[in-house]
Image: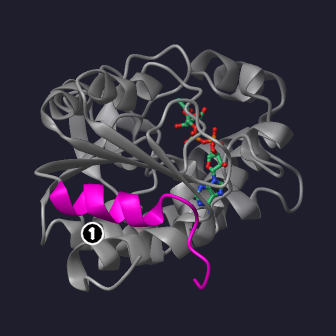
Amino acid sequence: MAQKPDGFAEAIKRLRAAKRLVVFTGAGISAESGIPTFRDNGGLWQTFPPEKFASWKGLLRIAALNPRQLAEFLIAVLEPVAIARPNAAHQAIAQLEKYVSTTVITQNVDGLHQEAGSIRVREVHGSFFKIVTLRGRFLHRLVRDDLRRIVERLQRTRSGLFKLPRLGLALRPMIGLSFAAIKRPKIVLFGDALAEPDWTHSQTDMDSCDVVLVVGTSGLIYPAAWLPQRARQRGATVITIDPSEPGDSDIWLRGQAGELVPPLVRGAFECSGEG
Ligand code: OAD
């Protein structure tokens, strides 16, 4: 990137001085991996309004009234995740652990931070890849290929006469009966408590870090959105990378994650000339 945004050199300085770093991410970090965000133009909630689609109750209602629409929603959600690869921003964040004590706290359920190599990742809104019982007891993990197969089967439900049992069969690796329990992905929808133990650990992380790098979140969904402010109130520096202006931040680097995160990491830790 030729032209660096205002604040870039200062962000490098603060990052280089960090003793404990938290990277807090939202849907924007995965946008360049092809996963649409929720609230931008073309975002998921524009086609599928959250009042109808963002709660278990809403989804059950749609399953009963309009199962074909539920299949369309599931394809829209799962297909981009099933074929996504980590982008340059995920990869640069994974490099940070080599230089400074780093925890990634993400609101995303796409598993891309782990796939890029980040070790300490808190998934406060859960994950498509963790399958749990209705009460949240861990059962097993899926891999990205499982999601691909689910999407292929969901797509086949579109052809011919739509039948609800075919939808159930398509989703079987993720949702349905498993031995004596009903299984589901460990994802947090509206009205749910945040995913534990990640949520509790995230609050502790915010109480002991000195820099928070926020990437690609509108900061509109609470309680996760409180996390950076919790650290800032104690004196931690909050650096935000986002094309849109954030609410509270010490340094705002305006732009895309894939363009700004890699040179920021390089500048802070890999070559002192950047910035
Ligand atoms: P949003 O869709 O609310 O916000 C996406 C943010 O990413 C915006 O601030 C964009 O400006 C920014 N953005 C877009 N492209 C970007 C890029 N290439 N690089 C960097 N930033 C970019 O998504 P979240 O803030 O993640 O929760 O949404 C928070 C929660 O709301 C989600 O976890 C989900 C949703 O409802 C639940 O469903 C519980």
Percent position of residue 106, x then y: 38, 45
Rendered-image quarter of ligand 1: top right
Q: Depth check: give the residue in front, 56 or 243.
A: 243
- Per the image, label 1 sits on a secondary structure element best described as helix
Say which residue appears at 30% left-offset and 19% top-offset: 135
Q: Depth check: give the residue in front, 173 or 193.
A: 193
Where, quadrant-wise, is the C terminus in this rendering?
bottom left
Label 1 Cα neighbours within 10 Å, binned few <14 / some 14-19 / many ≥20 = many
Q: Is residue 6 magenta?
A: yes
Percent position of residue 162, x then y: 84, 48
Identify the residue position indicated by label 1 in the image. Answer: 94
Above or below, comparing residue 70 to residue 8 in the picture: above
Where, quadrant-wise, is the N terminus in this rendering?
bottom right
Magenta extent: 1-17
Percent position of residue 230, x then y: 31, 22
Percent position of residue 196, x then y: 24, 27
Apparent side of residue 14 relative to residue 147 in the rendered image (left or right): left
